[in-house]
Image: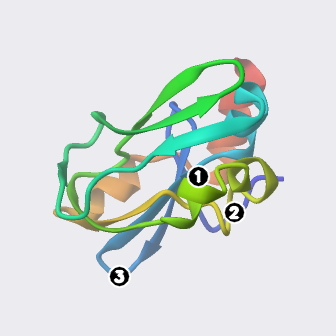
């Protein structure tokens, strides 16, 4: 299931917008492709991120994958629960397993991301 209230990237990140803040995680599709997640390298609070650049890392039994910023801004919060429980990404990628909150420089960047319908068509075409 792909939540309809989120926006998505071609790199399989999701964004939940709350005012000028973007809550970011990886999609269910991404976690299935990765397999069992064993480690998450979170960004630093205060870190400036640029849309399209990597800002975090998720390591699974299969691979190490960069997580790319879907919007530009400043990291204002990270999900420290993932340090001790990285498997949350496999269990609940859209809720408890968010990675970071970014204070957006330009909230209109979200409009360039895919809707749930567009993302579903994208992964069906992969």
| Applied colour scheme | rainbow
CB of mark 2 within 8 Å of CB of mark 3? no
Tally the numbered discs. Answer: 3
What residue appears at the point 71 percent right and 56 percent down from the top-left corner?
Answer: 88
Give the mark toward the camera: 1 or 3. 3
| Element at label 2 | loop
Which residue is labeled 1 in the image?
Answer: 115
Tell me: residue 31, above or below residue 80. above
Tell me: residue 121, above or below residue 28. above
Q: Who comes first in sequence, dot 2 or dot 3?
A: 2
Give the class, few, some or many, for how many residues have Cα within 10 Å of label 1's Cα (few <14, many ≥20).
many
Which residue is labeled 3 in the image?
Answer: 19
Left or right of 80? Residue 95 is right
Which residue is labeled 2 in the image?
Answer: 4
CB of mark 2 within 8 Å of CB of mark 1? yes
Horizontal and vertical percent for residue 44? 26, 55
Left or right of 27? Residue 105 is left
Residue placed most toward the observer, 23 or 117: 23
Give the class, few, some or many, for how many residues have Cα within 10 Å of label 2's Cα (few <14, many ≥20).
few
Q: CA distance from mark 2 to mark 1?
A: 7 Å
What residue appears at the point 20 percent right and 43 percent down from the top-left corner?
Answer: 50
Q: CA distance from mark 2 to mark 3?
A: 18 Å
Q: CA distance from mark 1 to mark 3?
A: 18 Å
What residue appears at the point 48 percent right and 65 percent down from the top-left corner?
Answer: 80
The image quadrant that residue 91 belongs to is: bottom right
Tell me: residue 82, above or below residue 112. below
Give the mark toward the camera: 2 or 3. 3
Left or right of 72? Residue 78 is right
């Amino acid at each position: 299931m792909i939540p309809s209230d989120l926006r998505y990237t071609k790199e399989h990140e999701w964004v939940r917008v709350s005012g000028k803040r973007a809550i970011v995680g990886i999609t269910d599709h991404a976690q299935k492709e990765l397999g069992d997640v064993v480690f998450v390298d979170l960004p630093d609070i205060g870190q400036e991120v640029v849309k399209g650049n990597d800002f975090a890392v998720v390591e699974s039994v299969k691979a190490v994958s960069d997580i790319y910023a879907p919007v530009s801004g400043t990291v204002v919060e990270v999900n420290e629960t993932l340090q001790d429980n990285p498997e949350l990404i496999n269990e609940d990628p859209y809720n408890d397993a968010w990675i970071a909150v970014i204070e957006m420089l330009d909230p209109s960047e979200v409009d360039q991301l895919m809707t749930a319908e567009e993302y579903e068509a994208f992964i069906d075409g992969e």
